Image (cartoon, rainbow, N blue to C red):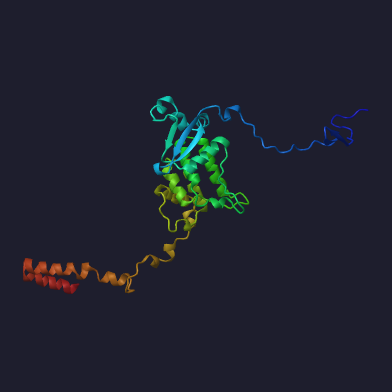
Amino acid sequence: MSYELGSFPPFKRKRCSLHGTTFMVGEPEREPSKISDKRIKVARGIRLNCQVIQVTVGPEDNKEIFYVHEDAICDRSAFFRNAMKPEWASQRPNPRLVDLPDDDAAAFALYLQWVYSRQLPIIPDGPGADSSSIDGNPILAYAYVLGERLMDIDFKNSIVNAYVLFARGTPPEKRAYPSNEEIRILYDGTPEGAPIRKLLIDIWCCRGKHDWLEGDADLPQDFLIQVTKGLLMARPTPDNLSRPWKASHVQYHERSEQGGGAKGEGARGEGVRGEGARGARVEGVRGEGARHGVMLRFNRSMV
């Protein structure tokens, strides 16, 4: 029996069993099952066969102590690689201790989670908890500033990704945006041109609300300038906008307390009734005599 190229006889389905696994012979191949691939390159593995170093974080009166494998953290942080070099470590009283007095302890704990697991445990636990529950908790901002100090670009990028995911509000989570406090922290702790600043500006230009400024206008000046520029660039063409000063000019007038408006104040100016007229009369009488006084009276009568 012969078959044309590309044609095959019909399969006869048959149930078979092999070592307790049942499968069908003659059945078309199915899509492979989904597997979360945990394989990584050897170079990205965490080196744990090394000594442990001590890290103290926070101000003197509220320090927290952490212990971390030297190779694990030095593989991630250029700051720690430099700090543990013999020429630098020998200058400290305890070469195996690194002090970070200006950083946030909770942010450093989050960083260690990243060092060991490449995960960021920041979504609250419990029923009904979602991304909006992080509002008022600036740990991500402190963590990014810490990443700036520790010179760990991958960690900073992971913080940016977290902010983006919160802003997108992946269902069923609600959208959550950086608070004003986080904006201040990030601007104080990052250099000009830091990419995360652009994210903050874009969020305000696209999703900002006027009440974000209510009662809290103490935001970095450069941030507000860039947001203003972004809004002006994003608005429609100026020729297509209505011009409120064309429709009504009175809205720009001041109102006097007596209700007379500009008319009352303008006519009663000091330059007319005050020093101007009185000064001219006195100068004319005392300086040049009666002739000038007559002229002055004539001039005043003209006025």
The quadrant holding residue 247 is: bottom left
Q: Is residue 134 above or below residue 146?
A: below
Q: Looking at the figure, which quarter contains the C terminus?
A: bottom left
Farthest left residue?
Answer: 289
**Residue that appears at 56% across and 35% down:** 116
Name the residue at the top extreme. 86
The answer to which of 214 and 46 lies nearer the viewer is 46
Q: Quadrant of residue 245?
A: bottom left
Residue 143 appears anywhere in the view: no
Q: Position of residue 63 (x, y in %)?
A: 43, 41
When the figure is inspected, residue 44 is found, relative to residue 186, above or below; the finding is above
Looking at the image, residue 55 sits to the left or right of residue 293; the answer is right
Residue 78 placement, left or right of 29 = left
Q: Residue furthest right?
A: 1
Looking at the picture, how far across and down is residue 236, in whole percent? 50, 54
Q: Quadrant of the N terminus?
A: top right
Can residue 5 be seen here? yes
What number of labels is visible? 0
Q: Nearer the viewer, residue 274 or 50?
A: 50
State the image coordinates of residue 91 (x, y, percent, origin top left).
Answer: 38, 28
- Residue 94 image position (x, y, % from top left): 41, 30
In the displayed structure image, the side of residue 170 where residue 283 appears, left or right: left
Q: Nearer the viewer, residue 34 or 67?
A: 67
